[in-house]
Amino acid sequence: MTAEFTPKKDYYSPMHTAEHVLNQTMMRVFGCPRSKSSHIEKNKSKCDYALPSAPTQAQLDEVVRQVNAVLAAGLPVTAKTLPRAEAAKIPGLDMSKLPADAGDTLRIVFVGDYDACPCIGAHVANTKEVGRFVLSSWDYNDGRLRIRFKLENEQ
């Protein structure tokens, strides 16, 4: 990988960065894995999570509160290219979604010391650039929690 990185996915960087923070927050609040699937767009996005039971509105309100606290904290968003073996030593790093052809060198995106994740997408430089996370709606069905969200007042 060269020093200049060209994202391989054309995600809207504020929304994609918010997805990273949401995933880590869901892991911390519910102890679940990162999203099973996601659809990230500029105006609205959604993530699906595997949960054994439906969350309460209070739990989801706490997720929103925590996501917004992280975004407002102004954490740097950085990327490092690391050998796979070195990346595997990062505490909490989930490499289970890596495709078979990911290779021996990975790009790890860090949101301050809050999150680390292998990623090929575009991100903002600082979480303050994201704006405010808003949970638009959610539903729970057969072990799948779908969260729909948008951003307001992005910088």
Image (cartoon, rainbow, N blue to C red):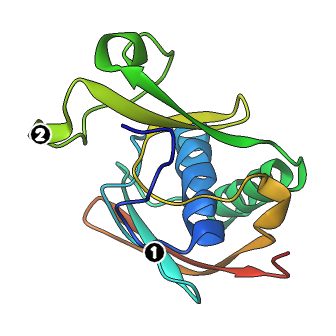
Q: Is residue 87 left or right of residue 21?
A: left
Tell me how far mark 1 sits from mark 2, CA to CA.
23 Å
- The quadrant of the picture occupied by the C terminus is bottom right
In the image, which is nearer the foreground, mark 1 or mark 2? 2
The part of the image, by quadrant, that contains residue 18 is: bottom right
**Horizontal and vertical percent position of residue 17:** 61, 58
At numbered mark 2, what does the secondary structure look like: helix, strand or loop?
A: helix
For label 1, the residue is 40
Helix or strand or loop: what does disc 1 sit on?
Answer: loop
Q: Residues within 10 Å of mark 2 (few under 14, many from 20)?
A: few
* 101 w.r.t. 44: above or below: above
Specify few, some or many for label 1: CA neighbours under 10 Å numbering under 14, 14-19, or 20 or more: many
Judging depth in this view, the residue of 135 and 2 nearest the camera is 2
The residue lying at 42 percent from left, 22 percent from top is: 82
Question: Residue under circle 2?
Answer: 101
State left or right for residue 86 relative to residue 26. Answer: left
User: Which kind of residue does numbered mark 2 sit on?
Assistant: Asp
In the picture provided, is 21 more to the left or to the right than 96? right
Question: Which residue is found at the position 20% from the left and 38% from the top?
Answer: 102
Vertical placement of residue 147 versus 3, above or below: below
